[in-house]
Image (spheres, grey):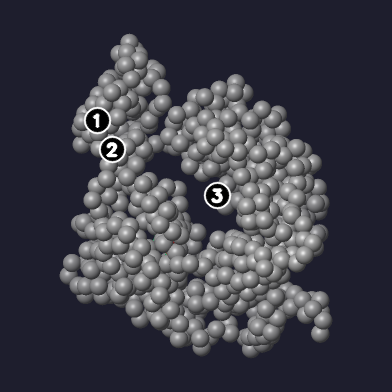
Amino acid sequence: MIKSDIIKKYKTKIKDFNKHSKLYYDKSNPVISDSEFDKLKQEILDLEKNFPYLISKKSISSIVGYKPSKVFEKYKHKVPMLSLSNAFDEDDLKNFEKKIFNFLDNKPKFSYSVEPKIDGISASLTYKNKELVYGVSRGDGKIGEVITENLKTIKDIPKKISSNNFPDDIEIRGEVFIKKKEFIKISDKFANPRNAASGSLRQKDPKETNKIPLNFTAYTYGHISVDNFENQSDFLKALNKWGFKTNGHNKLLNNIDELIEYHEKFEKIRFDLDYDVDGLVYKINELSLQKRLGFTSNAPRWAIAHKFSADSANTKIINIEIQVGRTGALTPVAKVRPVNIGGVVVSNATLHNEDEIIRKDIRVGDIVKIERAGDVIPHVIEVDKSKREKNTKKFNFPIYCPSCKSKTIKEFNLITKKYDAVRRCTNVGFECEKIAIEKIKHFISKEALNIEGLGKKVVEKFWELNLIRKPQDIFSLKYDYIANLDGWGKLSVDNLRNSINKSKIVSLQRFIYSIGIRHIGIENAKIISENLKNTEHFLEIIRTKKFEKFLNIDGIGETQINSLKNFFSNKFNSDIVIQLNSILKIQNPNLKQNGILKDKTFMFTGKLEGISRAEAKSLIEKNSGTTLSSVSKNLDYLVTGDKPTKKKIDQAKSIGVKIISLKELKKLLN
Ligand code: IVH
């Protein structure tokens, strides 16, 4: 059979499979017998095995008939299940520590709880009065699925606790995984052990879960009724006493040198372990420091995952294409001869930017080494110049945008006094087609409006069909027309309409993020929204261009202010915001909770002793207070540290703002 026929055959089978999967798993209403379904599945797996080029992220060998079922009940995690930031080398670790010291504003002594990062999937177990009452998957970190019965089939998970000193109400978290020797037995069905564990856990029928032996290692807690632990290592010991398994390679170390030494050792022995480990997790052992450090929007400040080195392979560059991103960045991507790297077929590798191509002198036709680590996009490590054919030419990076033909520029960075490595299209609005499409993809993405059913591919399709040209078009789609398109039907259109309607209620913070202003990510959007009274206030600032109001609030500097100005200098962009405001129901920011500092505003001047500005601000916010960046009638307290600005104190005095020391602030907080 020729390749195109194989692909055609494969696609038809996948289509059938998806249809029957849906009927079986989501609707619990199969129209073919189980054995017919299994046969179809096996045929697809055989095709993927014989023709590995068929394998992609979405392939059956990654999800197999164990496609997550939508029949599970949803569960909102009491404490979000966040992910970890990654470190790949010593510099990353030093940077991690530096950020901690900056946040704490001193260098307290602490140790690290070092734990192997088992490559499985995390689960949360809630025990009440010593009994397992809820078992939940991580889901998207905020909302998981109730899979209690499936988790109960795992022998490592205690169903009842007999120990005396077990908290009345506690949520224990850990990793569910499959051992290598068990995985080998079913490796024809799953791409890797992680998928095997995930697939098995989310079976509709717990009996199916029970067929694949899974394991559980505990490593942390979510909520806890009596919180009397001082250290992570004490908590790990308690877990053991209560009857949970913890990893035998957990260790307590003191500094980065020791971490690196252990990492090097572990990297060598990891292949001898009977489970997959993809790195080491380092957590600050002292829980009091963990509490002070808290979290950024998606990861704790007090922990990091130090990954093991990646898999790599050699292949040939067939072409170099230029992608245009949402912020106009021109990213060169190497289209390479497909190659299997650690179980995943790679056919694209990023070349990062123009400077990278020049530095490595990467050319079309070159044999290159490509690396892939975890979920990170594969990238070119080096060119094998000994294999370079004669007459190849240096790659000419375009100086005009390949999408809209505008001029491209490399910006000069005033801080580093260097030109950017990235070349950008100078268009900031929607006149550049590629930028516009990327902006719309950003607008609907998970962290923005989160419109399910309107994925990136659909946006591209709708753009092509002229259905969407700007974000607000999403809210006046012609559903009757869409229902007649290939691949669409009444049900899918109803679902799309529902999720679009649902997305109309959005927080101001998400809305600001969703507009896609360069340098205004989730954190900055949060800071901006917290310093606004309501959406009208935001529109007024856009109208009057008084973005300086945000200057010097944590994280907002000249770069962000210039970016806001630049973005809104484009009328198309400001019109989008005005029109979206009349379509969406934008929720006013932060209805503050009833903390001890509710309705009180603070500002700092001078160096505070033993606490960074960032921590002081987060402390005030934790107690429902607000921090301001200038002295005004709205300010209640000016908190002074060492060498305060005289002008601020004088201003505060003249309008009767209370001036207090850090000590007095601490008193207010008890
Ligand atoms: S702590 C907020 N400890 O890594 C703290 N996670 O990238 C995050 N993981 O979803 C959890 N071993 O699935 C923690 N000893 C360990 C871990 C571990 C594996 C996984 C877990 C989590 C992911 C975060």
Label whose residue precedes the other's in the sequence (2 or 1): 2
Determine the residue positioned at 45% across, 29% down.
552
Quadrant position of the C terminus in the picture: top left
Name the residue tied to disc 1. 662
Q: Nearer the viewer, mark 3 or mark 2?
A: 2
Residue 291 vs 390, above or below: the answer is above
Name the residue tied to disc 2. 611
Q: Are marks 3 and 2 in contact (CB under 8 Å)?
A: no
Determine the residue positioned at 40% across, 49% down.
95
Residue 366 vs 177, above or below: the answer is above
Q: Amino acid at mark 2?
A: Ile
Neighbour tally class for label 3: few under 14, some 14-19, many 20 plus, Cα within 10 Å = some
Q: Which mark is residue 496?
A: none
Comparing 192 with 134, the one in front is 192
Q: Amino acid at mark 3?
A: Glu
Q: Is mark 1 within 8 Å of ligand 1?
A: no
Mark 2 lies on a secondary structure that is: loop
Q: Is residue 136 visible?
A: yes
Comparing 492 with 434, the one in front is 434
How many badges with numbers are in the image?
3
Q: Is residue 59 visible?
A: no
Residue 395 vs 208, above or below: the answer is above
